[in-house]
């Protein structure tokens, strides 16, 4: 009887361990997953990405952002790449005015890889590798990307709206949203540093310049000299103009973002919010004071963490033939 009890306790523990590790982010990923099945996969990705970005360096930023958007909605499983169908509004259509870009690069990389190893490399892995290569091309850090992700079959505009932090998110909301994806407060402040590259539409922050609380006022958390500058670029109601998020160096991956945030020149309320928490504020101050002594290394680590969110591995999901379509 006692033995039976012991056995059943052990069995339960085993079940719990298997269950928990299956839920853990990143389960089933490994470095060099395609070493045997497609040994040149990462080379092909890097060379094809380089061809696009050397011609159009402003494509690097949206390619980084695509991986972020992919991972935060249903995990890193390529759902951001799917087209809408007759009966389904895909993630792509969720933010018509803040449009994602770079899909043609992913398609170009995918077809280059398919030529050599058809049906082997997932679109989700291609997104993770392209984001890494894009950052490196802007003089950012290099990191090893664990691979073995598989592609999902579902993409939902509604889920994009509820899972992606909006630019007006406050620090509590940001921390909760990152924690909900298994990412830490440190990951939040480090990954926000992705805003050292790229552009934003005026519409993502113009509420801070005009009528912030409905009294014709401006956001007190935004430097008033900077408001004057931004107003000259973004007229009220302008939905199409874009501005550099890190003016002058938006094509270089460096720690400037933290200097801007510290000077109250972060473009979004979500950037400014990093000064409202003692841990994130300390990180902003440290990178500012030390010329980004740990930022590039931290960013590499946090990107690996982000790339593990709710991945599909093993027999789950599929390897899409075309990144915009389920098989
Ligand atoms: C912390 C929460 C975040 C918020 C609220 C946020 C919000 C935004 C918004 C509103 C834009 C501008 C879109 C537009 O108007 O065109 C943007 C751009 C961008 N974001 Fe974020 N973001 C966040 C986190 C991240 C993360 C984690 C990354 C990557 C590690 C990232 C990378 C980028 C990049 C590279 C761009 C520029 C895209 C381009 O040039 O087209 N963001 N983000
Ligand atoms: C997906 O949609 C885009 C934009 O509507 C279109 O250009 C592209 O051809 C579509 N891809 C496929 C494989 O149908
Ligand atoms: C997006 O742009 C369209 C027209 O360009 C406009 O009618 C709509 O209000 C905009 N939506 C948002 C959320 O700004
Ligand atoms: C953050 O925003 C939420 C939702 O709008 C609100 O309930 C909360 O009070 C805000 N928290 C802070 C610290 O501003
Ligand atoms: C500012 O917002 C208030 C409240 O939403 C609105 O009544 C007013 O018309 C707005 N003013 C301008 C100049 O848009």
Image: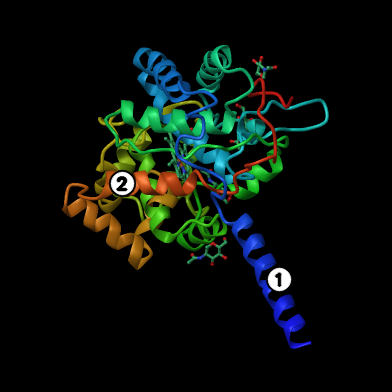
Which residue occupies the foreground of this view, 117 or 284? 117
Looking at the picture, does residue 50 appear above or below residue 231?
above
Q: What residue is disc 1 on?
A: 11
- Residue 326 image-quadrant placement: top right
Res 233 visible: no
Residue 318 placement (x, y as % from top left): 69, 32
The quarter of the picture showing ligand 3: top right
Residue in view at x 54 percent, y 56 percent: 177
300 over 126 or under it: above or below: below
Instruction: Between residue 34 and residue 192, name the one nearer to us.
Output: 34
Q: Residue at x 64, y 41 (%)?
A: 314
Residue under the image location 62 percent in, 36 percent down: 150
Circle 1 — which element? helix
Q: Where in the figure is residue 36, as x and y percent of width and height?
A: 51, 27
Q: Which residue is mark 2?
A: 265
Image point 65% across, 20% down: which residue? 322
């Amino acid at each position: 009887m006692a033995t039976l009890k012991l056995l059943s306790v052990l069995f339960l523990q085993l079940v719990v361990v298997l269950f928990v590790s299956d839920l853990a982010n990143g389960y089933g990923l490994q470095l060099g997953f395609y070493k045997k099945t497609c040994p040149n996969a990462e080379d092909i990705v890097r060379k094809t990405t380089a061809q696009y970005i050397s011609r159009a360096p402003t494509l690097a930023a949206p390619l980084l952002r695509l991986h972020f958007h992919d991972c935060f909605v249903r995990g890193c499983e390529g759902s951001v790449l799917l087209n809408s169908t007759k009966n389904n509004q895909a993630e792509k259509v969720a933010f018509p005015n803040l449009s994602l870009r770079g899909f043609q690069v992913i398609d170009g990389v995918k077809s280059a890889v398919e030529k050599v190893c058809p049906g082997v490399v997932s679109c989700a892995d291609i997104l993770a590798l392209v984001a890494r290569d894009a950052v490196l091309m802007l003089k950012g850090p290099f990191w090893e990307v664990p691979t073995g992700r598989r592609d999902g079959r579902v993409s939902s505009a509604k889920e994009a709206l509820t899972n992606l932090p909006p630019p007006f998110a406050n620090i509590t909301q940001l921390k909760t949203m990152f924690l909900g994806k298994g990412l830490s407060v440190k990951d939040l402040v480090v990954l926000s540093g992705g805003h050292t590259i790229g552009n934003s539409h005026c519409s993502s922050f113009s509420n801070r310049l005009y009528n912030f609380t409905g009294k014709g006022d401006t956001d007190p958390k935004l430097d008033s000299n900077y408001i004057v500058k931004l107003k000259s670029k973004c007229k009220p109601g302008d939905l199409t103009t874009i501005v550099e998020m890190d003016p002058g160096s938006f094509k270089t991956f460096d720690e400037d973002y933290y200097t801007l945030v510290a000077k109250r020149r972060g473009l979004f309320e979500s950037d400014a919010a990093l000064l409202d928490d003692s841990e994130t504020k300390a990180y902003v101050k440290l990178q500012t004071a030390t010329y980004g002594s740990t930022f590039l290394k931290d960013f590499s680590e946090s990107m690996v963490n982000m790339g593990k969110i709710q991945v599909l591995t093993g027999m789950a999901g599929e390897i899409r033939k075309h990144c915009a379509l389920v098989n």
